[in-house]
Amino acid sequence: MNQRFWEIFFHVYEDLPRQGPGNRACAAQALSLCATLPDAPRVLDLGCGVGGQTLYLADLLPSATITAIDSHAPSIARLQAKIEERGLSGRINASVGNMGHPEQPAASFDLIWSEGALYNIGLRNALGICRHLLRPNGYLAFTDAIWRKENPPPEVRASFEMDYPEMGWLADDIAALDASGFELIVHFTLPDAAWWDDFYTPMERRITELRPTYIGDAEALAILDQLAAEPAMHRRYADFYAYEFFVVRRSFA
Ligand SMILES: C[S@@+](CC[C@H](N)C(=O)[O-])C[C@H]1O[C@@H](n2cnc3c(N)ncnc32)[C@H](O)[C@@H]1O
């Protein structure tokens, strides 16, 4: 992808409530399965984006302190503004960082959260990092894209080939968890509402809103078309892939 693509991509994405599928109901469901969190848990949100799920977590866990990390500085600036607006500075610490090298002490978190982000550094690599940062028996709740039907149309295959070439099946993620010292508590598939409500619907609205800004700029309009193809693809072919929420626990040893 060239520089122009990323300029337009971020013009669309930074303004969205979140940068990937997920919603409050799914976060609440996953959190309800972390049954033995301490009263004031220490939480790490990896690849937080503009903080859609970070703010849900702050609300759902009113005594938690949350460290939120993302490598994209403008997203952290947006989250920072929301934190200040909501008076959450004492509870959420958002900073620019690389989750591949999170610079956090070992065994220092009760819960690591990551929606749609771990794959960026390779799932197995990420699981090793999370295990190192979690206290024994600490929880990891994350979402990951998986295939769910053979022989996807070329358009779907090409889209994931570009975005997540190592994407596997449910059994692959479960095997990775097993090999990385995690005990699976539960996994569930994100419902369609979690793709649309806070992600694809605002994305389509934003693309429509931005088109007049780029009138006469054929390259930018073609990139907006390219971005609009993703929700359109989901509308037609969602049965070929899914986002799976995994709630797992670091085994004690
Ligand atoms: C699909 S978005 C998900 C964002 C957010 N969790 C959500 O669900 O709305 C993936 C996020 O991971 C971030 N990211 C990618 N590689 C990263 C890295 N190495 N360290 C930290 N963040 C990273 C991106 O900047 C992006 O915000």
Image (cartoon, rainbow, N blue to C red):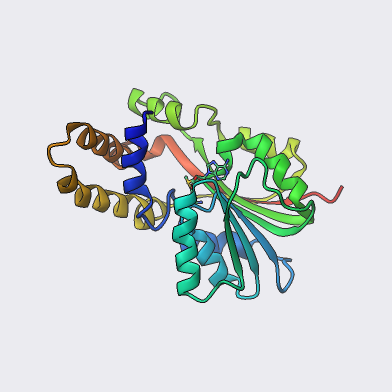
How far from the left and from the top, in percent, is residue 110? 73, 60
Q: Residue at x 53, y 53 (%)?
A: 48
Q: How many marks?
A: 0
How far from the left and from the top, in percent, is residue 223? 27, 35
Quarter of the image with the N terminus in it:
top left
Q: Residue furthest right?
A: 253
Q: Is residue 34 visible?
A: no
How far from the left and from the top, in percent, is residue 172? 62, 32
* Left or right position of 85 against 155: right
* Left or right position of 80 against 171: left
Q: Residue at x 75, y 46 (%)?
A: 131
Q: Quadrant of residue 121?
A: top right
* Left or right position of 174 against 119: right
Q: Residue at x 68, y 58 (%)?
A: 111
How far from the left and from the top, in percent, is residue 122? 61, 34
Taking depth in this image into account, of 16 and 89 the one nearest to the observer is: 89
Q: Quadrant of residue 3?
A: top left
Taking depth in this image into account, of 207 and 71 the one nearest to the observer is: 71
Q: Quadrant of residue 215?
A: top left
Taking depth in this image into account, of 189 and 107 the one nearest to the observer is: 107
Q: Is residue 72 visible?
A: yes
Q: Residue at x 31, y 50 (%)?
A: 203
* Left or right position of 236 against 144: left
